[in-house]
Image (cartoon, helix red, strand yellow):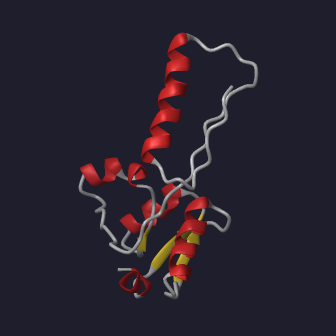
């Protein structure tokens, strides 16, 4: 739980990083005081600090897949912590798209509409 994490030496990425903003907001929203042990620049530095047993951290599970497979790091589920990162689909205005690219854009739009929270705005059409 978040309260348990607050009692651990917590390693955060640099100020201004999306992960740090999401983590700090989650703790603040839960009224749990986060007391970071250190802040480092970049996910790789954060992972190395955790590998060195300097503390715990919150990073994308996709950033640690190899370390988890190798048994270097372990993913712990935190029941009251859910961090969602907004993703943007961008492309050059007026660009010609192949049929495959158009199909991919259509797939992403449909997937977002049916699987992602309503808070995500409708994708504009190109």
Name the outermost residue toward the right.
94
Q: Percent x, y for residue 9?
A: 44, 81
Q: Quadrant of residue 22?
A: bottom right
Q: Is residue 37 above or below residue 69?
A: below
Q: The C terminus is located in which quarter?
A: top right
Q: Quadrant of residue 28?
A: bottom right
What residue do we see at 72% from left, 25% from top? 92
Q: Is residue 49 left or right of residue 78?
A: right
Up the image or down, 19 lies above or below 111; here it is: below
Where in the figure is residue 23, as x and y percent of width and height? 52, 70
**In the rendered view, does 121 fall on the left or right side of 79?**
right
Q: Is residue 77 above or below residue 32?
A: above
Of residues 1 and 11, the one drawn nearer to the viewer in this rendering: 1
In the image, residue 50 lies at what x, y percent? 40, 67
Residue at image point 40% right, 83% down: 8
Task: Answer with left or right where residue 82 lies relative to residue 23.
Answer: left
Query: Which residue is drawn at the image coordinates 40% and 49% (left, top)?
Result: 62
Front residue of 115 and 32: 115
Q: Say which quarter of the image contains residue 124.
A: top right
Q: Residue at coordinates 49% horizontally, 41% vertically from top-left?
A: 112
Q: Quadrant of the N terminus?
A: bottom left
Residue 115 in the figure: left or right of residue 13: left
């Amino acid at each position: 739980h978040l309260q348990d994490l607050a009692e651990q030496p917590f390693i955060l990425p640099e100020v201004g990083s999306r992960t740090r903003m999401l983590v700090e907001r989650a703790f603040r929203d839960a009224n749990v005081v986060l007391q970071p042990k250190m802040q480092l620049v970049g996910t790789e530095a954060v992972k190395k600090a955790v590998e060195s047993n300097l503390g715990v951290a919150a990073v994308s599970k996709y950033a640690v897949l190899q370390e988890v497979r190798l048994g270097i790091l372990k993913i712990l589920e935190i029941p009251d912590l859910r961090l969602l990162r907004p993703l943007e689909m961008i492309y050059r205005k007026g660009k010609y798209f192949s049929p495959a690219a158009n199909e991919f854009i259509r797939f992403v739009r449909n997937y977002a509409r049916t699987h992602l929270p309503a808070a995500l705005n409708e994708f504009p059409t190109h």
